[in-house]
């Protein structure tokens, strides 16, 4: 323990040389960040977040969270300019998304940015390193108001094992665990820098530690890579670097379905899944099915499954696939103007009704 | 659980241990400077035991700042501990509920010994990335009142945080990652020079418990300075509103603007502000967003006058830019900018610390501090208003004694009336019991040969006559009220006669020049009076206690008559009397004159 402490004090002393002041650092970093506004605003999911500009023409890295499920994704630049943004590529295994500012027609140039590929070449920061965190936590800033700045230290470089509600965090690689309370609402996609303002990593989500149930403050290192086991049994290495290099041509991996419950029989038939985000409206309820017993009706819109927001038929089916017969599921549905909570218990799919729970 | 990965293990094994002696001297210097600062300011930190919060002394006679939410619901008599380990009696002085500020006063154990106190800093100079020190008594940890010290960064400045239930609106506040917890409420935030830059009081919590989340807010000391005069005079201070609804113009446009989207009958509307005007500057600060506008608005108490610059698009495509001086109206009844539209995370005040002493009847004042308390509607503690008022009156009295001069008064002046280009003679006269019925007082005037007369206290006097001569806003009544004040003092007024705190006072623009509200502004001590339905504010120069001017309002829905006095000289009796006067009403100057003579008779 003594050695540890001495080591970190030593690092502090070394890092002090050639330092910029906190004030200079804030002024230098702030223009490279954007305030992000998208979907959310319910169930403790903020409708705001943070992103970091990585090219002069407006590519932005952020966390691949619910915020991006919006047709009206917007950013505010450091000078108050408001711009639309679109999602270019998402890698769920890294929990990172690449955005592009402006519309496909508009030309954006000369933005201040982080050379993220250069930052990746730097070695990982060691525990004990003093860090500064910048984000738009709690949506304190809008328009030209600057990001919130915090200071702390890297406490550990360790494997992330967190959860969001009942679900595992999407990213399970190594992270910088920090001793400042960085991971507040809206902080995701913000950055952690060292004393010189060099980019170290992206602030992650609001997660709880799987075992201690305490909140974790962490950042995904910019050098992050993950080995993903694919459906065919092979594995593939994914990295932020690859995402940034390939941009529009990046193909996210399709992972082997982990912990699939095979789904249970619920008896809801959804509207035809015709577009990317077909809202999960119930078209039909099969007689005597769990859904029927629970009182679900056609035209009900499923909004949450066990507290997890669902925005599309595809997403809903993917989630239900994880459950097993006899599992209890709590659905939050919108019927007319009102939200209602309905619980149903899944059953074994009856042989006589082939359509039940089947995908189109 | 978080499992340490390999690099950490390597770090521990292979890094050589470094001893303190090897540290960069710069770090050691900063460390010792920090310790010195903490040593210096610690004695000024207050543990507000009643209420379970913190505070900070700001004057040698024991005035201390804390949060409103610390003393709310408590008796006005408080118990406070200092770092010397002694428990002091204290008394509530003034309250700013919306701004979440309370001024209290500690009673010395030894009258000769001054209290240690913190110097006030300039919070407008604080920048993101600055270091800061918070002190206080979180969780009521220290039973000997030794303050807890936390050290961190300024995360944001000029932050706006929405009010909670109409209170605790933190405008223009300082955001810190310096840890503040329950019990830190009301405690000081210092810069590294040990100057008081804010009062800690709120945090953003959301999902996590109501303890430090790395996002705390301190009320900026510059805002509190604006309210200090009001707080010291025992008031329940109201914040300001503009009398207009502002909205973020064109949320869809790439840059944000602050637009006037609604107006009520107010000083702002009388000064010419209209719907669809764009607010460019408010009190000298640019207003690019609604947050910035609200930040500025929150800095001022009700009734203050501040400049506002707006831009108006004309129909022909050109635009007009104009600067006006706006008298701000109150906030509490007219919450025009209530921002319920958007659900934002509302930061909440730090809860109070545990283990508060249980008092049987928490409301009743008790103990040795009770003699410094007097309840009155509109005041946190009327005792302090009387104290401030009497101090002000005593100071004013040194400039001349008018008590014996209860007879006829006459003032003669020569000057310019309205926009008439020539010099006119003006006579103002008050005759006690001079009315036809022989009972009412009579105020008369001759303006460029035209006679006017009004009975200022007659019930049946019409509102129009009260504003005579036309265009002055009520100069005759104002002259009557001035005589009333100088001759009778408190006895001359049946309604309000109170200290009105501090307000900005704007000297009249010199002839032929453009108004410059920065250069012409000075701070003035205010006395408020009310008599015969006429409310007046008397502005005194806090340096020599000369009457700078007054605002006499015969009609609360209209502009007051403003008189500015200058060029004071001693008369044969040693009384200071002004040699010049300027009278304004609304946007216009009514009179600019040299006073030729004062005639004040004894009864």
Image (cartoon, coloured by chain):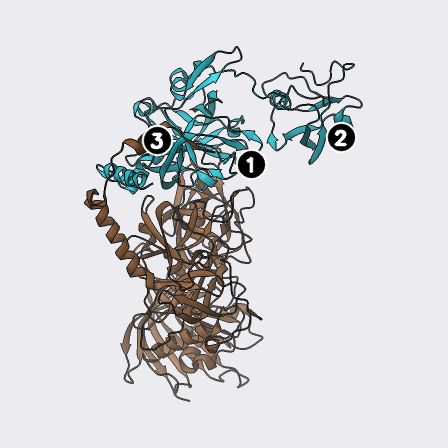
Chain colours: A cyan, B brown
- Does residue A310 appear in the picture of this structure? yes
Q: Quadrant of residue B9?
A: top left
Determine the secondary structure under disc 2.
helix
Chain of the residue under the numbered disc 2 shown in the image? A
Q: From the viewer's side, name the closer residue of B178 and B335.
A: B178
What's the chain of the residue with tag 1? A
- Marks 2 and 3, how far apart at CA: 54 Å
Number of labels in the image equals 3
Image location of residue B525, percent across then percent down: 37, 68
Secondary structure found at label 3: helix
In the shown orientation, is residue A333 left or right of residue A86? right
Label drawn at residue A294:
2
| In the foreground, B246 or B221 | B221
From the image, state whether disc 2 or disc 3 is nearer to you.
3
How many residues crowd mark 2 within 10 Å: few (<14), some (14–19), many (20+)? some
Viewer-nearest of discs 1 and 3: 3
User: What SS does tag 1 mark?
Assistant: loop
Q: Chain of mark 3?
A: B
Q: Residue furthest bottom?
A: B603
Near mark 1 (Cα within 10 A), the count class, few <14, some 14-19 or many ≥20, is some
Q: Which residue is mark 3?
A: B9
Which residue is tagged 1?
Answer: A41
Q: Are marks 2 and 3 on the same chain?
A: no
Specify the label residue B595 is tagged with: none
Taking B603 as reference, is A117 left or right? left
């Amino acid at each position: 323990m003594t050695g540890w402490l001495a080591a970190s004090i030593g690092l502090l002393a070394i890092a002090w040389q050639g330092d910029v002041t906190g004030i200079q650092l804030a002024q230098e970093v702030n223009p490279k960040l954007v305030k992000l506004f998208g979907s959310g605003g319910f169930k403790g999911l903020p409708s705001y977040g943070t992103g970091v500009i990585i090219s002069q023409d407006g590519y932005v890295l952020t966390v691949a969270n619910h915020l991006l499920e919006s047709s009206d994704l917007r950013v505010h630049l450091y000078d108050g300019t408001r711009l639309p943004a679109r999602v270019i590529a998402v890698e769920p295994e890294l929990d990172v998304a690449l955005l592009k500012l402006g519309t496909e027609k508009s030309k954006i140039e000369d933005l201040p940015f982080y050379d993220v590929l250069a930052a990746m070449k730097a070695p990982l920061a060691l525990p004990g390193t003093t860090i500064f965190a910048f984000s738009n936590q709690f949506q304190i800033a809008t328009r030209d108001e600057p990001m919130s700045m915090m200071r702390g230290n890297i406490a550990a470089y360790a494997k992330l094992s967190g959860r969001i509600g009942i679900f595992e965090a999407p990213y399970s690689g190594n992270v910088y665990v920090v001793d400042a309370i960085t991971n507040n609402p809206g902080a995701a996609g913000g950055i952690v820098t060292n004393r010189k303002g060099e980019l170290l990593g992206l602030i992650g989500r609001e997660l709880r530690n799987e075992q201690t149930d305490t909140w974790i403050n962490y950042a995904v290192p910019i050098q992050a890579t993950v080995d993903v086991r694919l459906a065919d049994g092979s594995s593939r290495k994914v990295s932020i670097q690859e995402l940034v290099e390939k941009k529009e041509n990046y193909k996210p991996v399709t992972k082997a379905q982990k912990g699939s419950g095979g789904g249970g029989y619920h008896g809801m038939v959804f509207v035809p899944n015709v577009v990317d985000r077909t809202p999960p409206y119930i078209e039909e309820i099969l007689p005597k099915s769990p859904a029927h017993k629970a009182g679900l009706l056609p035209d009900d819109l499923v909004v949450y499954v066990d507290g997890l927001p669902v925005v599309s038929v595809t997403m809903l089916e993917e989630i239900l696939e994880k459950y097993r017969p006899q599992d209890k599921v709590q659905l939050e549905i919108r019927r007319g103007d009102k939200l209602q909570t309905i619980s149903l218990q899944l059953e074994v799919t009856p042989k006589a009704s082939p359509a039940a729970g089947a995908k189109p | 659980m978080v499992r340490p990965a390999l690099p950490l293990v390597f770090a521990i094994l292979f890094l050589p241990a470094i001893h303190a002696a090897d540290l960069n001297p710069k770090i050691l210097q900063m460390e010792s400077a920090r310790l010195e600062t903490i040593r210096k300011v610690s004695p000024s930190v207050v543990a507000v035991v009643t209420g379970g919060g913190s505070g900070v002394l700001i004057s040698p006679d024991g005035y201390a700042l804390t949060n409103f939410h610390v003393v709310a619901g408590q008796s006005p008599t408080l118990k406070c501990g200092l770092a010397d380990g002694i428990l002091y009696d204290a008394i509530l002085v003034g309250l700013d509920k919306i701004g979440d500020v309370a001024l209290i006063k500690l009673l010395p154990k030894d009258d000769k010994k001054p209290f240690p106190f913190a110097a006030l800093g300039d919070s407008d100079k604080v920048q993101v990335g600055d270091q800061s020190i918070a002190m206080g008594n979180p969780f009521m940890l220290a039973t000997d009142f030794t303050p807890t010290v936390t050290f961190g960064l300024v995360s944001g400045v000029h932050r706006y945080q929405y009010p909670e239930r109409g209170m605790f609106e933190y405008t223009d506040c300082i955001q810190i990652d310096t840890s503040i917890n329950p019990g830190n409420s009301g405690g000081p935030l210092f810069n590294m020079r040990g100057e008081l830059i804010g009062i800690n009081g709120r945090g953003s919590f959301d999902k996590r418990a109501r303890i430090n989340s790395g996002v705390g807010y301190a009320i900026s000391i510059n805002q509190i300075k604006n309210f200090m005069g009001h707080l010291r005079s025992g008031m329940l201070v109201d914040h300001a509103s503009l009398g207009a609804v502002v909205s973020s113009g064109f949320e869809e446009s790439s840059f944000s603007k602050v637009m006037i989207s609604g107006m009520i009958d107010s000083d702002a509307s009388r000064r010419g502000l209209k719907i669809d005007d764009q607010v460019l500057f408010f009190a000298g600060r640019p207003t690019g967003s609604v947050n910035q506008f609200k930040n500025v608005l929150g800095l001022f108490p009700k009734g203050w006058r501040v400049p506002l610059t707006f831009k108006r698009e004309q129909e022909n495509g050109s635009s007009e830019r104009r600067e006006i001086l706006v008298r701000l109206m109150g906030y509490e009844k007219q919450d025009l900018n209530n921002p319920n539209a958007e659900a934002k995370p509302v930061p909440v005040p730090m809860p109070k610390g545990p283990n508060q002493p249980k008092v049987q009847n928490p409301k009743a004042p008790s103990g040795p501090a009770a003699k410094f308390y007097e309840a009155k509607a509109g005041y946190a503690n009327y005792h302090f208003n009387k104290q401030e008022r009497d101090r002000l009156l005593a100071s004013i009295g040194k400039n001349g004694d008018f008590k014996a001069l209860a007879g006829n008064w006459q003032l003669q002046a020569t000057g310019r009336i309205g926009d008439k280009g020539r010099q006119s003679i003006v006579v103002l006269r008050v005759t006690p019991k001079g009315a036809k019925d022989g009972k009412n007082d009579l105020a008369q005037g001759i303006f460029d040969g035209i006679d006017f007369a009004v009975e200022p206290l007659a019930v049946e006097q019409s509102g129009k006559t009260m504003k005579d001569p036309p265009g002055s806003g009520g100069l005759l009544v104002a002259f009557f009220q001035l005589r009333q004040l100088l001759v009778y003092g408190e006895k001359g007024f049946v309604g309000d006669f109170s200290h009105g705190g501090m307000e900005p006072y704007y000297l009249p623009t010199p002839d032929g020049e453009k108004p410059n509200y920065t250069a012409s502004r000075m701070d003035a001590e205010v006395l408020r009076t009310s008599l015969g339905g006429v409310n007046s504010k008397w502005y005194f120069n806090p340096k020599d206690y000369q009457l700078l001017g007054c605002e006499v309002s015969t009609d609360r829905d209209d502009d007051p008559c403003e008189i500015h006095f200058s060029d004071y000289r001693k008369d044969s009796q040693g009384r200071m009397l002004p040699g010049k006067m300027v009278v304004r009403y609304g946007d216009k100057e009514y009179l600019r004159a040299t006073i030729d003579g004062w005639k004040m008779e004894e009864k």
